[in-house]
Amino acid sequence: MGRNAKIRKQRKDSAVKEVSSLPQKPLPKRQSENTSFWGKIAASLNPFKKVDKYQACMDAHDFFEENQVLVGATAWEGYQQQGKGLVLVQGSDSSATKIEYIPRKFLKKSMRQHDVAPQDTQAMDNMISVYEPTNSVVMAYINTVGEMSISMSPQNDPTPEDCYRMSQQTT
C-alpha cells in the first residue's frame, strides 16, 4: 500500500469514527406480520418472500427525520473536505447504523462494492451534479434487508452547515 493510499484510508477511518461517535437514534423495528403459529407455518411454506416495494423508502424517510442533524452534519463536513457527494447510510440489526460520506469521484467504485446497478449509479451521479450543498442533502439508504433508496432532500431548517455547527457543539 502506497503512502497516498494509507493517507486516504486513515482519513476514511477517522471520518467513520467521528460520525459513529455522534449520538444516533435507533432504526425503526419491523413488526412481524405472522405472529400466530399457523401464520408462521404458512410463511415458511411460501417460496416467495413478501416484498413491500416502498419499505426502503419509508425506512430512509424515518431515518432522515429522526437523524436530520447527523445526516446534514455528515454531508456538510464531507462537502467541505472532499467536494460534492452523497451520504451513505447502511442499516443493521446487529450493530450501530453505519454512516459515511462518499465523494462524487469515488461514487462508481463504492457503489460497485455494494452491487448497485450502473444505471442506478448514474442516477446518483446525476443527483449529485444538480443538488445544492448549502440547502439539500443526497442520501442513499440501504436497509437491513439490502434494499436501497436514494433521495435528494431539501434541508432548509436547519441547513447542513447549521447541522454541522450543532454537532460540533455537542462533541
Image (spheres, rainbow, N blue to C red):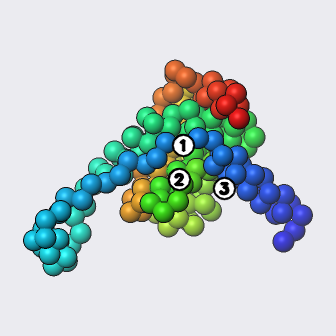
User: Does 157 sit above or below residue 45?
Assistant: above
- Please give the residue where the numbered disc 2 appears in the rendered image: 97
Spot occupied by residue 142 in the image (x, y as percentages of width and height): 45, 55
Residue located 71% across and 31% down the image: 168
In the rendered image, which quarter contains the C terminus? top right
Please rate how many residues cluster around mark 2, counting C-alpha atoms within 10 Å: few if below 14, some from 14 to 19, many from 20.
some
Residue 106 — which label?
Answer: 3
Structural distance between the alpha carbons of marks 3 and 1? 26 Å
Is residue 57 rendered to the left or right of residue 50?
Answer: right
In this view of the protein, which residue sits in the foreground, 20 or 149?
A: 20
Which mark is first along the chain, 2 or 1? 1
User: Does 159 sit above or below residue 28?
Assistant: above
Is residue 104 rendered to the left or right of residue 96?
Answer: right
Circle 2: residue type: Thr
- Please give the residue where the numbered disc 1 appears in the rendered image: 24
In this view of the protein, which residue sits in the foreground, 112 or 9?
A: 9
Furthest residue in direction left, as rendered? 38
Circle 1: residue type: Gln
Furthest residue in direction right, as rendered? 3
In this view of the protein, which residue sits in the foreground, 1 or 108?
A: 1
Query: On the image, which quarter does residue 135 sit in?
Result: top right
Residue located 63% across and 41% down the image: 22
Numbered circles on residues, count: 3
Please rate how many residues cluster around mark 1, counting C-alpha atoms within 10 Å: few if below 14, some from 14 to 19, many from 20.
some
Spot occupied by residue 99 in the image (x, y as percentages of width and height): 58, 50
Residue located 75% across and 52% down the image: 14
Residue 144 — which label?
Answer: none
In this view of the protein, which residue sits in the foreground, 118 or 92?
A: 92
> Helix, strand or loop at disc 2?
loop
Please rate how many residues cluster around mark 3, counting C-alpha atoms within 10 Å: few if below 14, some from 14 to 19, many from 20.
few
Residue 118 seen from this side:
no
